[in-house]
Image (cartoon, grey):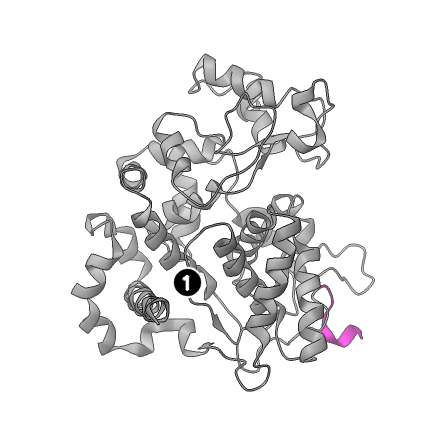
Amino acid sequence: MLKSLLNKWVFLVLMISVLVSLRRTPEKIVESETESTHPIFSVFLQRDLAQEDEASSGSTLYLEYDYYRETCPEAEKIVSSTMARIYEEDQGVSASLLRLFFHDCFIRGCDASLFLDDSNGNKSYLIERQAIPHTTLKGFDKIGLIKEELEMACPGVVSCADTLALATRDGILLAGGPYYPVFTGRRDSIQSYYQEAMAGVPGPDDNLNRILQLFSVRGFNERETVSLIGAHNIGKISCQFIRSRLYNFKGTGQPDSTMTDDFLNEMRLNCQESNSNSVDVAPAPMRSRKMTELTAGMSYYQGLTSSISSGAGFDTHYFHNLLKGRGLLYSDQQLMADEKTADFVRTYASDDGTTFRVNFATAMVKLSILGVLYGSQGQVRTNCSLPVNNF
């Protein structure tokens, strides 16, 4: 009973916060750094404002909580139970799906366009999955497994976009992250957006201005940006994304000069130099026990000289590392380059994780309804990699 009431309270707080955020224009969002760093404070101050104009809540008007309650009442249970089984075998799935979800939503919205793997026989037609920022994404097969379970229970009902949104939330929960409600009713795209994916996803060597610009045009302010990037606190970052910073930063032939010698040496111990192209998905040649197939990367939780990378639960170790100047990615450490983002890093590192968890949950709700298709738009795929008309 107490747990049920708590979940309802969390749901109410998150929804009011998201409605307030969505009704503001991007220009106002960019100027929001004077607001409280904790959304709960502004939620209750602006509750009346949010209730005045529910029509401004954007995509939430077209999605519903428990959308499949009549057409596929067991849908969310199927997703959560299947995710639990997958997580038992592969705890890295939480980070994989979170990254997959972010990349899908960031390009034209949460419409599963990233999953399309068909060009109707046109070899010159490049699909979104082939874009350089997407070549190392994992978890497509896991969503495929969940989708198969849903199709057996309710053929042609639950979209791939909703499957990914629900599975991502459940994966975050399994990793110890916060609960947040997922609205459903998304439809699947019939198009893939290769060119936009090439240019629209933040990269590991991006500076802060570039990062903030990419988030701002999608309606996210500095607090939400730092919160979402904080998702790097789970999972492991491949050496592919770190190596250029250690050996040839931005084509200089030198490492990133902002790194201390000690930190540089620790990172080089884990990610040794390779002659392979920087976009090659294959790991570097293995030259020591530390460079095995399983450890060709680092997490923010592991000691950088550890021979294993165990990952971590969902907490604030990521922000503590940034405060020490030990961001694994240049783009991560850039959050400390300006007070408008560094202040949030310090805030998230200053308590037991409550502030970060609340802000992250609120930002994830907002991300999950970004640019969704609904109603008669798009379609509901039965196989996430193929549009319906290919069957």
Q: At x 30% / y 34%, what residue is drawn? A: 338
244 lies left or right of 263: right
Dot 1 crowding, Cα within 10 Å, few <14, some 14–19, many 20+: many
Residue farthest front in this picture: 1
Name which quarter of the figure residue 236 lies in.
top right
Please give the range of residues in magenta.
385-391
Point out residue 254 in the picture as x, y percentages from the top left corner.
Answer: 54, 16
Q: What is the x, y in percent for residue 231?
A: 46, 46
**Residue 183: image location, x then y, percent:** 46, 72
For the N terminus, give its image quadrant. bottom left
Q: Is residue 222 visible?
A: no
Where does residue 143 sit, x and y in percent of width and height?
65, 61
- Residue 386 in the magenta stretch? The answer is yes
Q: Residue furthest bottom?
A: 70
In this view, 84 is above or below 222 = below
Residue occupying the point 65% across, 66% down: 191
Q: Which residue is mark 1?
A: 180
Quick check: can you spot residue 103?
yes
Answer above or below: position of 96 versus 170: above
Left/right of residue 89 with respect to residue 17 in the rendered view: right
Residue 153 within the segment the image draws in magenta: no
Q: Determine whether the residue tagged by mark 1 lies in a helix, strand or loop.
A: loop
